[in-house]
Amino acid sequence: MAAKAAAIRKTSHRSENFIQKLVKNPKIPFAIALLIADSILVALIIAYVPYTKIDWDAYMSQVTGFLEGERDYSNLKGDTGPLVYPAGFLYIYSAIQYVTGGQVYPAQILFGFLYILDLAIVVFIYLKTDVVPWWALSLLSLSKRVHSIFVLRLFNDCFATTLLHAALVSIICQKWHLGLVIFSGAVSIKMNVLLYAPPLLLLMVKAMDIVGVISALAGAALVQILIGLPFILLHPASYLSNAFNLGRVFIHFWSVNFKFVPEDIFVSKAFALSLLVAHLSLLLVFAHYRWCRHEGGLFAVVRSKIIQLKLRVSQRNPSSTKKVLQADHIVTTMFVGNFIGIICARSLHYQFYSWYFYCLPYLLWKTPFPTLLRLFLFAAVEFCWNVFPSNTYSSLVLLCVHLIILGGLWISSPEYPYVEKTTDKSTSKKKAS
């Protein structure tokens, strides 16, 4: 009886400790509750909100042409025009067509699961970084537009975004080569993922030696070659010019971010060039003064890598020089780099909101702004993306809010990038005592 009573007391004590831990750190139970609640919401949306026909029929037409044997990208067309996505898009939507029979409703269910999977991945990233308070995780589920993009529009942006977030998880866990493979898979679905490429390259240079960087990039390139191989072998020019067309001019009517710019200026090469210059300039400034601040600036990082390469070639230092980056630094650099690209994009269509919505709470809490201002800015961005059609005022407000957030990120203190190596000081102290 005494042993049984002791066991009961021990179990009770463990339960009390578990409850105390949940009270002190409610992030995990709140995250689980958030996923469950959003799953119910997604099911209700699919059941009761009418599907909006936009690109689904075009996707299915393009996939049908591919499955029938067409390998010339210029001949793969739908009712919205020619195919402009890399071959990974075709493989994904071919599988979807096989599973769903090309029907919208089962595809919506599939995209509902994809939405929850993506949300779970993003929540994991937020939990690993511990930047956002537990209650602010709810912001990740409060976008009407993002729910619509996933389960009412079925855009390929959803798959690209999910794979990008999966690649980021892999990189946070220091699986750089795997992360680059997944990243390349995301690019093969939609090229917007390349907005993350400059900050990703910088992180690779900081974390890996030159051999690691080259091998990781080679792995990513190999993925692109293998995915596009059926088209590259037969019609390489057609595939590369259509799937990776960087000179596309979007229709002014659908622009959410620069609707206030007159159409003749919007479609001009001068406007595109000015945005490109602004994009590259902002990346360089943030890289030098923020992302590489603790190393002495961007040029100091590059110089150190050149010295390491010379030493490696001369065989005086053949050993690898890998460093472990903090999760906060990885996520901040990636999210801010992508956000700069979003600000400088000539045209953001409604589905492009998924490119950066999941970054917003993190970015807002990296600024030194008070909480009420953070929430106001979040609501302002969401409001602008739900104005349809966009107009001069909504696009101008969106740009201003973006610039305010970027200004907050600029004045915030950059985090220390590296994980401190453990020393044996504590051990020696224990021995001395």
Image: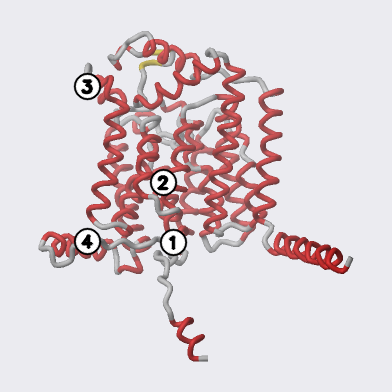
Q: Position of residue 259 (x, y in %)?
A: 46, 34
> Between marks 4 and 2, how big is the CA–CA gap?
24 Å
Looking at the rendered structure, which numbered label has been put on residue 305?
A: 4
Instruction: Determine the residue positioned at 38% across, 10% down.
Output: 65
Residue 356 placement, left or right of 142: left
Residue 312 in percent (x, y) is at: 16, 61
Which comes sooner in the sequence, label 2 or label 1? Answer: 1
Residue 51 in which image quadrant = top right
Q: Earlier in the sequence, mark 2 or mark 3?
A: 3
Q: Earlier in the sequence, mark 1 or mark 3?
A: 3
Farthest residue, direction bottom:
433
Vertical placement of 244 versus 400: above or below? Answer: above
Q: How crowded is the residue under tag 3: few (<14 C-alpha within 10 Å), some, or many (20+)?
A: some
Question: Does residue 99 appear left or right of residue 171 in this picture?
Answer: right
User: Dot 2 surroundings within 10 Å: few (below 14), some, or many (20 or more)?
Assistant: many
Question: Front-most of 17 and 299?
Answer: 17
Q: Nearer the viewer, mark 2 or mark 3?
A: 3
Mark 4 neighbour class, 10 Å CA radius: few under 14, some 14 to 19, many 20 or more: some
Instruction: List the residue tagged with mark 1.
Output: 326
Whichever of labels 4 and 1 marks the residue nearer the N terminus, that label is 4
Q: Distance from label 4 to label 1 (Cα)?
A: 20 Å
Residues at marks 4 and 3, CA–CA distance in whole angstroms: 35 Å
Residue under pointer 2: 338
Quadrant (top left, top right, bottom left, bottom right) of the N terminus: bottom right
- Of the image marks 4 and 3, the number of the one nearer the N terminus: 3
